[in-house]
């Protein structure tokens, strides 16, 4: 197999506007690391890379947790048993500023959370059980973040005595043990899906969401272990996900999806601070998929990557934010051409020098794409298919080290109900290679069906609500400011691979006049559960309204 450090330039895909971005440089072949031994169709796995390029890959099969590693160059080595596991191990990896690596996973039996730590240049500690759940926990959602001095924080979803979900956490000592560190109960009952971020001083931010999707919460933990009171982030955390992170100056960032928009709230560094008002990122289309954490270089410059569903197509867009409390994110810039497929598996990684990689899965073709930014202020490269040909890609991870040398990993479903993992080295071309458009260009062109027009006023949708009728069935009622085509997208919250997500289950499109309107959602019985409706209107000139999101539930009979 050719070494992963060699690169080959692939032909770039077409990008919007007239400028042509250079393509991602890829290793000539990918490396199949795991064989067919991941015994779950979702292919959950974790990928991490250290500043010097050393990398680790972690996954679970039917019996064990498996790991493979590589130095700063070359191939990944032979996989080895890392711990006892199961088909839904939900592994995660985290690296710290001082070079340590933390690994966490769920054991299938008993359903508990285990961790191993490795100091910089050292070996992994023995497996240690950090949870102590007395009741069976169907999905413990383990998360891990590194702390200074080789320590780590772990969070998971547990169960109280009433068998209700509850978020818990525990600190792990530098030797990999938990002696003297109590289990912390962070949330009240009926909350799950925790996440963690830490800064170089040892401060931490925990986030979680309510089971019914009506509330997202953040809680700050100071370096001395003191917990601040929980803070409400949003009352509508669509996608059941909140993504926390820290910049090098100690500011805590929380990315979340609120209705049809991605938003970010920032907590300034220091005592007695609270999260400020939300900075809206997505103002060009419907927010698509779950949020990915805001990522930072060593100067504190922030990069955000989001998925936008616009005019029936999916586009990856990015924004940046300069360091400081008073700064805001730039307008979103198109980082990929529109594709027909929808994806919720967007991943972003930024190196200390500002080099970045983003990767995602195109759901129609099941291909894995990657884009790379060679330096701060430069544009991302053109999107390139980085997954091997013919793979049915289901999950993706991305990691970036200094010098613009990154890795993307793709897990693909195979015919026997298992998955395999392929890893590929990616590298940004030198700045100036090709015609790299500057930041701020590359907007997605308008719908080709919308010809030039002097009309620049977008239609508005107001007073939207869902009503049910025994005769007419369910329908959405609203007022329309002008004649337009209105599209209603219907999504249902479902559980998949241990996580909740929005699944598109249908859409309705109607040409309507101005005034009060009703669009029938169909009289056929819908499955019980929580649903989201998103309304968008477009007039004959191509002007598009802001998205209007509604939620309703179909109760169990």
Image (cartoon, rainbow, N blue to C red):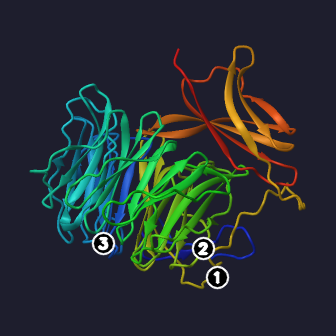
Residue at point 78% right, 41% down? 486
Q: Is residue 261 visible?
A: yes
Rounded to the nearest angstrom, the CA distance separating label 3 from label 1 is 31 Å
Q: Nearer the viewer, mark 3 or mark 1?
A: 1
Mark 1 lies on residue: 434
Q: How many residues crowd mark 1 within 10 Å: few (<14), some (14–19), many (20+)?
A: some
How far across and down, in percent of the image, does residue 191 sit?
37, 37
Question: Could you classify mark 3 by the number of other residues whose Cα lies within 10 Å: few (under 14), some (14-19), or many (20 or more)?
Answer: some
Q: Is residue 196 placed above or below 52 in the rendered structure?
A: above
Q: Secondary structure at mark 3?
A: loop
Disc 2 to disc 1, how far (Cα)? 8 Å
Q: Which residue lies most toward the left here?
A: 179
| Within-10-Å neighbours for mark 2: few <14, some 14–19, many 20+ | many
Question: In the visual, does 1 lie left or right of 488?
Answer: left
Quarter occupied by residue 118: bottom left
Res 63 → quadrant: top left
The residue that mark 3 highlights is 71
Q: Nearer the viewer, residue 516 or 416?
A: 516
| N-term-proximal mark, 2 vs 3 | 2
- Residue 537: % across, % down: 77, 45
The reply to whether discs 2 and 1 touch (Cβ–Cβ < 8 Å) is yes
| Front-lying residue, 337 or 477 | 477
Q: Secondary structure at mark 1?
A: loop
Q: How many marks?
A: 3
Q: CA distance from mark 2 to mark 3?
A: 26 Å
Res 78 visible: no
Residue, disc 2: 23
Q: Which mark is residue 239?
A: none
- Name the one closer to the observer, 544 or 74: 544
């Amino acid at each position: 197999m050719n070494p992963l450090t060699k690169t080959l330039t692939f032909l770039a895909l077409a990008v919007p506007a007239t400028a042509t971005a250079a393509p991602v440089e890829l290793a000539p072949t990918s490396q199949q690391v795991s064989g067919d031994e991941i015994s779950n169709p979702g292919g959950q796995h974790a990928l991490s890379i250290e500043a010097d390029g050393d990398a680790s890959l972690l996954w679970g099969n039917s019996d064990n947790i498996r790991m493979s590693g590589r130095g700063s160059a070359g191939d990944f080595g032979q996989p080895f048993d890392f711990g006892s596991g199961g088909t839904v191990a939900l592994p995660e990896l985290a690296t710290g500023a001082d070079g340590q690596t933390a690994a966490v996973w769920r054991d299938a039996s008993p359903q508990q959370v285990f961790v191993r730590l490795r100091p910089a240049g050292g070996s992994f500690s023995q497996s240690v059980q950090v949870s102590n759940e007395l009741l069976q926990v169907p999905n413990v959602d383990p998360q891990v973040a590194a702390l200074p001095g080789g320590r780590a924080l772990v969070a998971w979803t547990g169960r109280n005595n009433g068998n209700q979900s509850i978020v818990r956490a525990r600190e792990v000592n530098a030797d990999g043990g938990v002696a003297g560190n109590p289990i912390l109960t962070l949330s009240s009952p009926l909350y799950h899906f925790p996440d963690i971020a830490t800064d170089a001083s040892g401060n931490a931010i925990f986030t979680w969401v309510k089971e019914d999707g009506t509330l997202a919460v953040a809680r700050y933990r100071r370096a001395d272990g003191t917990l601040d009171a929980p803070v409400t982030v949003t009352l509508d955390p669509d996608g059941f996900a909140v993504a926390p992170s820290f910049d090098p100056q100690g500011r805590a960032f929380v990315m979340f999806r609120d209705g049809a928009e991605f938003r970010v709230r920032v907590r300034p560094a220091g005592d007695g601070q609270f999260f400020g008002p939300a900075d809206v990122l997505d103002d060009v289309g419907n927010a698509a998929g779950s949020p990915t954490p805001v990522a930072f270089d060593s100067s504190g410059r922030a990069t955000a990557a989001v998925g936008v569903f616009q005019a029936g197509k999916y586009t990856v867009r990015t924004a940046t934010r300069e360091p400081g409390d008073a700064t805001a994110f730039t307008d979103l810039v198109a980082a990929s051409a529109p594709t027909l497929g929808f994806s919720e598996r967007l991943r972003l990684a930024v190196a200390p020098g500002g080099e970045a990689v983003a990767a995602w899965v195109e759901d129609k073709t099941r291909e894995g794409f990657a884009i790379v930014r060679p330096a701060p202020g430069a544009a991302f490269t053109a999107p390139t298919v980085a997954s091997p040909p013919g793979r049915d890609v289901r999950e993706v991870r991305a990691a970036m080290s200094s010098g613009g040398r990154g890795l993307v990993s793709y897990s693909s479903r195979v015919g026997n109900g298992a998955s395999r993992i392929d890893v590929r080295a990616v590298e940004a071309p030198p700045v100036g290679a090709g015609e790299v458009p500057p930041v701020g260009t590359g907007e997605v062109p308008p719908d080709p069906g919308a010809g030039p027009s002097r009309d620049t006023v977008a239609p508005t949708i107001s007073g939207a609500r869902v009503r049910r009728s025994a005769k007419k069935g369910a329908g959405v009622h609203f007022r329309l400011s002008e004649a337009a085509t209105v599209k209603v997208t219907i999504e249902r919250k479902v559980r998949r691979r241990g996580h909740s997500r929005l699944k598109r289950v249908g859409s309705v499109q109607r040409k309507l006049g101005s005034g009060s309107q009703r669009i029938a959602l169909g009289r056929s019985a819908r499955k019980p559960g929580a649903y989201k409706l998103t309304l968008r209107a477009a007039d004959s000139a191509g002007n598009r309204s802001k998205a209007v999101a509604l939620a309703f539930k179909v109760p169990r009979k």
